[in-house]
Amino acid sequence: MMDSLQENNRARSEANGQCASILLERVLRFNNKWKLSGIQRIQYNALEKIVGGYGTIPGKLIWPNSLTTTPDGDLAVKDSGTGLIQIYSADGQVKQRFPYGFEPIKGLGDITCMKNGVLLVTNGTKIIQLFSKDGVLIHELKSPKITWPNSYGIAVLKANKIAVTDWSDGGKINIIGVDWRMNAVLKTSSIEGFHRPVRLAANKSDEILVTEGQLFGRYQGCCIKVIDKGNKVKRTIGPRYGLVRTFENPSGICEDGHGNIFVSDEGENCIVMFNPDSTLSTVLVNEGLQGPSGLSMLDHGMIAVTDCYNHCVKIYRYK
């Protein structure tokens, strides 16, 4: 009887050891794949800081819908609820706030930053505003060559170009050549065939990453598209990704220094990370968000997201 019990315990121990070895092997194999993307360990729901909170006094936010990182490491947040842009230091202290006006439709528009620190702001009209980091309106970029009715997402490209999304004719990405010395539009061209393109990001290869959402009803899209330098769709990610997940309303998008792609999904209230060739994906944040929209990379393996309906910006560590 005792020998039989010892044998059963030994068999059970060996089986548990084999299961643990298999699990460890899978974990190591998974992490080794991510290591090729510069990720040694993935942090899930690792909230580092909350900036903002409901209110209209300096530092508070009503409906933050987009943000960008400045060359100084500050965060510039566009608040559609107050019509203000607020600049926060790395430790979350407000340094500057200034008005940009209001959108014809709440929530439209975006903000990005050039290498010289000039902020570019769209607000759902044909005009692109240029602000200094001190909040001075430098210029309003407008031209008869800009023919689309509503601007949305904006990204800075190389060769003195910017990309702007709009929803006319189903959806387009407009490429605008700019003479920045004169702040003049030189020429425009369009990449067509999109469905509600929302926000944009440019990667280090000058390819365009664009999210297709469905902000006002169920439309086609619900995916990410990667546009090469020849203005062709190089790759589509979604609507389905991973084994069981599906994008509902992808919005913000950005890329880190290793080429990993990050997407906020306003419908699923989460942030998803893909490795550079999108063969791997993981949900970084799946709790505590309500309407995550704009995304921006920070230093030291952190990412910032505008948590729209919680009236704040949240900063997460992902590695």
Image (tube, helix red, strand yellow):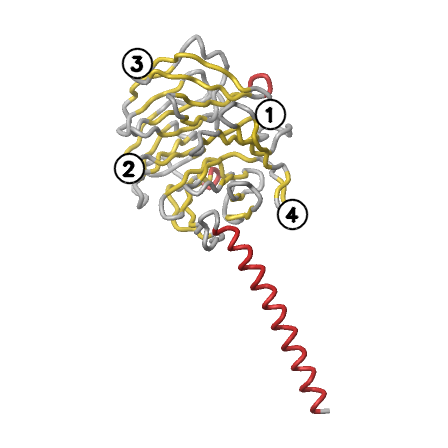
Q: Quick one: label 4 or label 3, which is nearer the N terminus?
A: 3
Q: Identity of the amino acid at label 1?
A: His
Q: Secondary structure at mark 1?
A: loop
Instruction: Give the residue number, with chain letter if any, for mark 4.
Output: 243
Foreground mark, 1 or 3?
3
Mark number for residue 182? 3
Q: Residue at x 46, y 35 (%)?
A: 294
Residue 49 in the image: state x and y as whole percent: 38, 48
Q: Quick one: label 1 or label 2, which is nearer the N terminus?
A: 2
The N terminus - image quarter = bottom right
Q: CA distance from mark 4 to mark 3?
A: 51 Å
Q: Identity of the amino acid at label 4?
A: Leu
Q: CA distance from mark 1 to mark 4?
A: 24 Å
User: Is the C-beta separation of discs 1 and 4 under 8 Å?
Assistant: no
Q: Residue at x 35, y 13 (%)?
A: 184
Q: CA distance from mark 3 to mark 2?
A: 25 Å
Q: Quick one: label 2 or label 4, which is nearer the N terminus?
A: 2
Q: Secondary structure at mark 4?
A: loop
Q: CA distance from mark 2 to mark 4?
A: 40 Å
Instruction: Give the residue number, with chain letter if any, for mark 2.
Output: 72
Graded by Cα atoms within 10 Å as few (under 14), some (14 to 19) or many (20 or more), the crowding at tag 1 reads many
